[in-house]
């Protein structure tokens, strides 16, 4: 089978078009947010909220008129989405619940190894049946037990933890409970059957074997990024996959006609895209794809950023999330977001809302070398910052120092009102 070849620019254009980060907005409002999560398969959840949580940031960059309440409603009112393990803790469509039955079965088996846990599970379920949603603070189970969450399977070690929290997490991972709602970072749990349809909860797993499930997940991750290569990739995190299993899964999906291999100039490893995206690939190659430039601020754990080696290879952009880097060793700041402008990563931004005063402080902007600082660039930045302020419920913007370049004069120390 001959493998076609594309340029790096065409690879970039294809990925950005697939992601909905270039051209006219394809994802609009709450329906668009749901449509994007279905396309990506999953988006990563992270509780850190500096200027929006990671999942919210992922959606605001590509969903026109997105509001944080939309994701909350999709999760805890509409129940079209669930938060559960996938690429670490993630958010994914509830319609995919049957595929993850092996996760839940493994969790139940592991749970039986913890002394006294089953008795506590029965006690917790009876209390929730009678009293409704609970948090670890409101569930009347006291003391500590030796327990280890199977949400992140990194070994069978156990540690002493709060009994109420442990039993709720175990029942949640087992699929007996779902998260009913959250208040800040505190989770409230309720019985899954009260919130997910019976036809979803009782549906058989479409994947009869582990290798089928792996192929389904590999296909899903390819769809999330757009193009993935036959190389160790953090985009495959959580799949229990090595080089041999990855190669076999890619071969199987190719033979089944679900993915198409392609070479990218100057890169030895083949890339793969979903066969259903062949029309988009043709549009990119024949020049008919909508490539109207937009500016977006990208989340640190956005699907676009799942494989930083791929980003480096295709865009020559180096990004490190410095939230866990000691302050003295940071190049930029605690929580910076990549700035995507058209087909290029133009730089990164540190924008922090003060939720008491309703002011978004743009503390710094770092432009990449070679980025021409034009009026067009700054107009796009101003528009994007205004939208970002609204996303963070801020009515005013304050620009601080942004790199000291002469062309920053028209924005430095500006104070703009959104009223």
Image: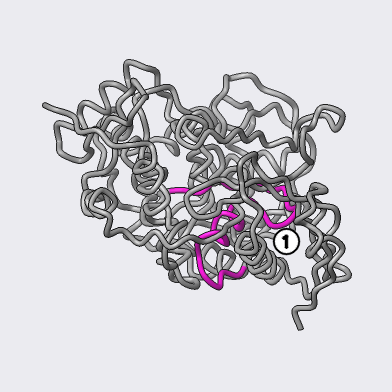
Instruction: Specify how the rendered protein is coloured.
Output: one colour
Residue at 79% x, 32% y is 330
**Magenta span of residues:** 42-67
> From what the image shows, is residue 311 above or below residue 295?
above
Query: Front-most of 416 and 257?
Result: 416
Residue at 26% x, 50% y is 277
Label 1: element kind:
strand
Quadrant location of the C terminus?
bottom right
Q: Residue furthest left?
A: 1
Within-10-Å neighbours for mark 1: few <14, some 14–19, many 20+: few
Q: Which residue is mark 1?
A: 183
Locate residue 163, reporting x and y percent.
72, 38
Q: Is residue 104 magenta?
A: no
Query: Front-most of 63 and 180?
Result: 63
Residue at 36% x, 25% y is 266
Q: Residue furthest top?
A: 244
Q: How many marks?
A: 1
Residue at 66% x, 53% y is 373
Locate residue 312, reporting x and y percent.
52, 31
Q: Residue furthest bottom?
A: 419
Quadrant location of the N terminus?
top left
Locate residue 221, reporting x and y percent.
39, 40
Identify the image quadrant of residue 165. Answer: top right
Q: Is 79 displayed left or right of 51 in the figure?
A: left
Q: Is 109 displayed left or right of 131 in the figure?
A: left
Q: Is residue 54 magenta?
A: yes
- Examine the rendering and report whether any part of residue 418 can be seen: yes
- Examine the rendering and report whether any part of residue 201 can be seen: no
Locate residue 65, reporting x and y percent.
55, 73
């Amino acid at each position: 089978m001959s493998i076609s070849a594309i340029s790096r620019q065409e690879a970039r254009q294809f990925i950005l078009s697939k992601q909905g980060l270039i051209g006219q907005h394809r994802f609009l409002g709450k329906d668009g947010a749901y449509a994007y999560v279905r396309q990506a398969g999953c988006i990563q959840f992270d509780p850190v909220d500096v200027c929006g949580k990671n999942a919210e940031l992922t959606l605001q960059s590509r969903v026109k008129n997105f509001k944080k309440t939309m994701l909350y409603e999709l999760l805890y009112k509409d129940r079209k989405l669930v938060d559960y393990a996938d690429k670490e803790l993630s958010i994914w469509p509830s319609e995919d619940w049957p595929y993850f039955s092996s996760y839940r079965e493994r969790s139940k088996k592991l749970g039986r190894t913890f002394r006294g846990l089953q008795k506590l599970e029965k006690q917790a379920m009876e209390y929730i049946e009678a009293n409704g949603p609970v948090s670890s603070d409101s569930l009347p189970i006291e003391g500590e037990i030796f327990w280890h969450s199977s949400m992140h399977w990194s070994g069978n070690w156990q540690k002493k933890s709060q009994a109420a929290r442990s039993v709720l997490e175990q029942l949640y991972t087992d699929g007996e409970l779902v998260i009913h709602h959250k208040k800040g970072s505190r989770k409230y749990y309720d019985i899954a059957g009260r919130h997910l349809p019976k036809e979803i909860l009782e549906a058989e797993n479409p994947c009869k074997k582990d290798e089928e499930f792996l192929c389904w997940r590999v296909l899903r991750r390819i769809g999330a990024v757009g193009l993935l290569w036959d190389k160790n990739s953090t985009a495959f995190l959580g799949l229990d996959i090595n080089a041999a299993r990855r190669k076999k899964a890619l071969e199987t999906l190719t033979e089944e006609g679900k993915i198409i291999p392609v070479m990218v100039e100057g890169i030895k490893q083949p890339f793969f895209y979903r066969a259903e995206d062949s029309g988009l690939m043709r549009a990119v190659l024949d020049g008919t794809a909508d490539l109207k430039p937009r500016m977006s601020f990208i989340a640190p754990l956005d699907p676009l950023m799942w494989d930083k080696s791929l980003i480096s290879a295709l865009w020559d952009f180096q990004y490190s999330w410095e939230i866990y880097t000691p302050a003295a060793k940071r190049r930029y700041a605690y929580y910076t977001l990549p700035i995507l402008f058209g087909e290029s990563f133009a730089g990164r931004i540190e924008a922090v809302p003060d939720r008491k005063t309703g002011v978004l402080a743009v503390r710094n902007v770092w432009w990449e070398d070679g980025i021409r600082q034009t009026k067009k660039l700054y107009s796009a930045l101003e528009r994007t910052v205004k939208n970002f302020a609204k996303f963070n419920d801020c009515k005013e913007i304050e620009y601080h120092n942004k790199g000291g370049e002469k062309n920053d004069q028209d924005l430095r120390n500006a104070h703009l009102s959104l009223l």
